[in-house]
Amino acid sequence: MSFPEIILEWYRLNKRDLPWRRTKDPYRIWVSEIILQQTRIELGIDYYLRFIRKFKNLAELAKADEEDVLKLWQGLGYYSRARNMHATAREIVSRYHGQFPETFDEIRKLKGIGEYTACAITSLAFNLPYPVVEGNVLRFFARYFGFTDPVDTGKVKKEIYRKALQYLDANLPGTYNQAIMEFGALQCRPGNPDCRICPLNKGCYAFQTGNVDKLPAKSKVQKQRKRYFHYLVFIVHNNKRKHIYLRKRESDDIWKNLYDFPLIETNGPMAQDRLMLTNEWKQMVEGSKFHFRKRSDLYKHILSHQIILARFYFIDISGKLKSPFSLIPLKDIGKYPVPRLIEDFLTNNISQNE
DNA sequence: AAGGCGGGGAA
DNA sequence: TTCCCAGCCTT
């Protein structure tokens, strides 16, 4: 049997029952592919089910507010995916009358859809012969065919794309693509794969040369940067209900278009007395009466490229803060999309029915 | 080509 | 701790 036949047979016996494998609806395929970018299947399943339950089709997504899309995305990370999906839904409504485009070139041009996702949608939804090349496929090809150069370069990715196209089963591109990704995820997994039971170990470069744990090679070493966040949690008591100030993060930074609190960021750790002497602090509370109540412990929030060291300052205030901040009833805070860090803080410190 | 963009789970 | 996940966009 040829290698694609072995993969297909392995897939028939070992595939998981995943919700997006039960549909040919390009909208649902698209949603699943975006959610799964840099995201584990097990984590993505619940988000996918909730997403298609709330936005049942492309038209519903297009007419939703971006904020509601982000709220559904909360906790999943890489929020540009949600922003781009929402924008793309509207683009498809206006440019394609709400009909999902069916050619590779049209799909590839859509915001948030790169080379991999365009291949995935065209093959899975429309059964067109485009090979998927993502993490699983790169790993499998690097090991099986012995691509020893780093796979996170354009050069090797192109070589593997060519190889993938060569072996693609043009009769069953959708099934074949699913199969090879599933094989990479389950059999040719990143750590400690069980090569003894692998149906392809005979022809596998890495297995035969004892390099399974060295492939695929990676070149990029991403380093983390430390950031120091001082969140000012202004509570307003002069109404019947407590209110709180939020800010929408609109700059090109982490968590774009999500909400957090008025923030002072410093280059290093800073004690409270020094913080209250900074210009940022003075401008923030200028013209209002405030009373510092307490300070939270240090929160260490780890992203793949940043380490956020955050502290929350509880401050009672009367009078108004200036415009970039919006005053909202504390009981409504759950409606706003917030980063995981803020979500964690809220569950620890704020009871929603105050 | 390189860097930014989240968060979680497994070893 | 380290790795890496059905990647994409901007510079």
Image (cartoon, coloured by chain):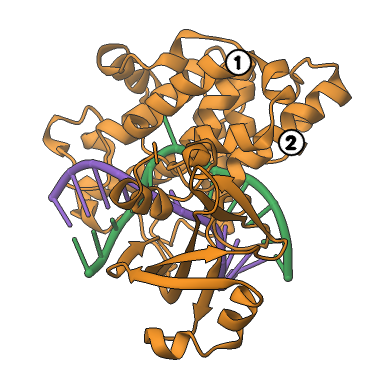
Chain colours: A orange, B purple, C green
Q: Quadrant of the C terminus of chain A?
A: top left
- Residue at image coords 63%, 17%: A26
Residue A347, image x, y percentages: 32, 45
Figure quadrant of residue A313: bottom left
Residue B3, image x, y percentages: 55, 72
Horizontal relation, residue A298 to residue A110: left or right: left
Horizontal relation, residue A163 to residue A320: left or right: left
Q: Chain of mark 1?
A: A
Q: Nearer the viewer, mark 1 or mark 2?
A: 2
Q: Chain of mark 2?
A: A
Figure quadrant of residue A221: bottom left
Mark 1, residue position: A125
Q: CA distance from mark 1 to mark 2?
A: 21 Å
Disc 2 marks a residue whose amino acid type is Ala
Secondary structure under the numbered disc 1 in the rendered image: helix
For residue A133, say whether it is visible.
no
Secondary structure under the numbered disc 2 in the rendered image: helix
Disc 1 marks a residue whose amino acid type is Ala
Figure quadrant of residue A194: top left
How many other residues sit within 10 Å of disc 1, few (<14), some (14-19) or many (≥20)? Answer: some
Mark 2, residue position: A87
Residue A218, image x, y percentages: 39, 62
